[in-house]
Image: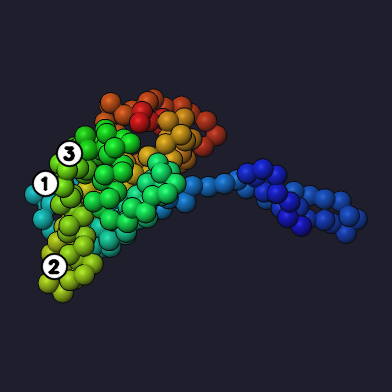
Amino acid sequence: MLFFSGMISRLYTDDTQGRRHMAITSQKIEPHWNYLLAIENDLTELSRYVDFDERNFGCFSIQIARVLLSASAEIDVVCKQICRNIDSQSNANSIHKYRDKIVSAYPAVPQFQVVMPFFGLTLTPWDEWKNLQGIPFWWSAYNKIKHNRDTEYHQASLKNALNAVAGLFIMVLYLYKDKAEQGDLHPSLQLLRVDNSHYGGISVGGYGVAISYKL
């Protein structure tokens, strides 16, 4: 028998004497955070075979293409939701419209940096959004691969994939802005961090280390 109580659902079972036992307790999850964690896990796996060094930025492969395509497709979904959070009547459905709506509400996005300390890398994936008509280079690569994979497969480079995942990280933080600022996104990412200007501290609890963000 399933009962709902607010945001938490409880599954109860009855034994032969009619006594009720709680078998499972669950609460609302954030699916886009979980998807980001899965993509980051793909990066971790990839790093065992290709070092994340600038000398390898141009290398491409099927696995790198999968990371780039999955991260970029997820960005499309997340950006639509952010735009609707900003304006419930929003019909933004392209990178140009996402840029106009999101940068207007969150002007720090173009300068937002993602750090990968283990590899000594700092990425600014939305840097091109500083310009009125700017489109991230990795987004252009994503579209070329999506529509013309037979001729543009080489665009599935490590540089583009890393920037796409970093770009997704930033957008997911803004999608879950309140939880991100409160340190309520669990579990924490392992490879990706924010720069000092967006770091709000850590706390330790039942879910492990929780990071709060300044957005």
Q: Which mark is residue 130?
A: 3
Of the pair 109 and 197, the residue shown nearer to us: 109
Instruction: Indicate whether 184 appears above or below 26.
Output: above
Q: Amino acid at mark 3?
A: Lys
Q: Circle 2 sits in a helix, a strand or a loop, which is it?
A: helix
Q: Amino acid at mark 2?
A: Glu
**Crowd around label 2: few <14 · some 14–19 · many ≥20 (10 Å):** some
Residue placed farthest to the left in the image? 55
Mark 2 highlights which residue?
Answer: 152
Between the residue at mark 1 and the residue at mark 2, the CA separation in whole angstroms equals 21 Å
Q: Amino acid at mark 1?
A: Glu
Mark 1 highlights which residue?
Answer: 54
Q: Quadrant of the C terminus?
A: top left
Between the residue at mark 2 and the residue at mark 3, the CA separation in whole angstroms equals 27 Å
Instruction: Indicate whether 162 appears above or below 156.
Output: above
Q: Quadrant of the N terminus?
A: bottom right
Residue placed farthest to the bottom in the image? 150
Of the pair 34 and 143, the residue shown nearer to us: 143
Q: Nearer the viewer, mark 1 or mark 2?
A: 2
| Residue 62 point in image, percent of width and height | 23, 66
Q: Nearer the viewer, mark 2 or mark 3?
A: 3
At a point 15% along the width and 41% down the height, the residue shown is 131
Lower sequence index among marks 3 and 1: 1
